Image: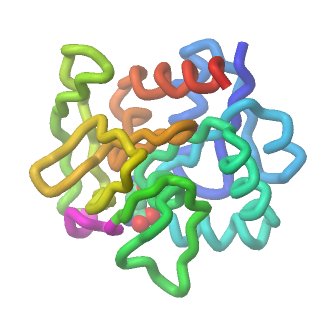
Amino acid sequence: APRVGVLALQGDVREHARVLGDLGAEVVLVRRPEELASVDGLILPGGESSVIDKLSRSFGMQQPIRAAISEGMPVYGTCAGMILLADRILGGIDGQQTFGGLDVTVRRNAFGGQTESFETFLDVPALGPEPVPAAFIRAPLVVEVGDGVEVLARVPEGAVAVEQRNLLATAFHPEVSGEHRFHRRFLELVRAA
Ligand code: GLN
């Protein structure tokens, strides 16, 4: 079974661990560089990207994660995790930094505040014909993509699922909708790496 880490500093770690377990992966909660070194892929959960950014720096995890990304480790980010993968962010707070690697510009909280969270169904042709349930919770939006980025799903305002080499990111949370196809696709990246 692939050994997959979930960055466990803040956010919906448990939901991701459950989906990965359902799909037969061996799950490691990652808080330290040694734990990161032991996994074949990493999930950046949803939560609060500015908090995960700060904690990753105080836990000495920013540089190891950046190195793993540039060495080709598959990483899947949902919501806050998408923000953390973006090379450029709009609306970051307090000198907020990202791990980067994904050649996109992401706007934080692009759909408004907590009360404007919503659930919808998206067409994601790369995952097959069945629409994908998508929970948007103070979600970001991809407002600009570089040449090497494949857009997997969009809403009228911009892109909400993207892939570039070893990196996969969704503005929404498949892990809270019982939706497993993005995680399955991610595990294929892990097996192929
Ligand atoms: N708004 C949050 C952030 O900027 C993301 C919300 C989420 O992950 N559900 O990090």
- Front-lying residue, 105 or 45: 105
Q: Quadrant of residue 117?
A: bottom left
Horizontal side of residue 160 vs 68, given as left or right: left
- Front-lying residue, 73 or 35: 73
- Front-lying residue, 124 or 109: 124
Q: Residue furthest bottom?
A: 94
The quarter of the rendered structure image containing the C terminus is top right
Q: Residue furthest left?
A: 156
Instruction: Residue 151: give x, y in percent of width and height.
Output: 30, 41
Main secondary structure of the magenta stretch: loop
Instruction: Residue 168: give x, y in percent of width and height.
Output: 47, 39
Reply yes or no: does residue 160 show up in magenta. no
Number of numbered discs: 0
- Determine if residue 108 is in view: yes
Horizontal side of residue 134 vs 162, given as left or right: left
Colour scheme employed for the rendering of this structure: rainbow
Q: Ligand 1: which quarter?
A: bottom left
Horizontal side of residue 79 vs 20, given as left or right: left
The quarter of the rendered structure image containing the N terminus is top right
Instruction: Residue 113: give x, y in percent of width and height.
Output: 25, 69
Q: Residue at x 38, y 34 (%)?
A: 174
Q: Residue furthest right?
A: 34
* Magenta span of residues: 107-114
Q: From this view, report whether residue 79 is shown above or below residue 57.
A: above
Instruction: Residue 39: give x, y in percent of width and height.
Output: 77, 33
Q: Residue at x 24, y 28 (%)?
A: 124
- Determine if residue 47 is in view: no
Q: Quadrant of residue 5?
A: top right
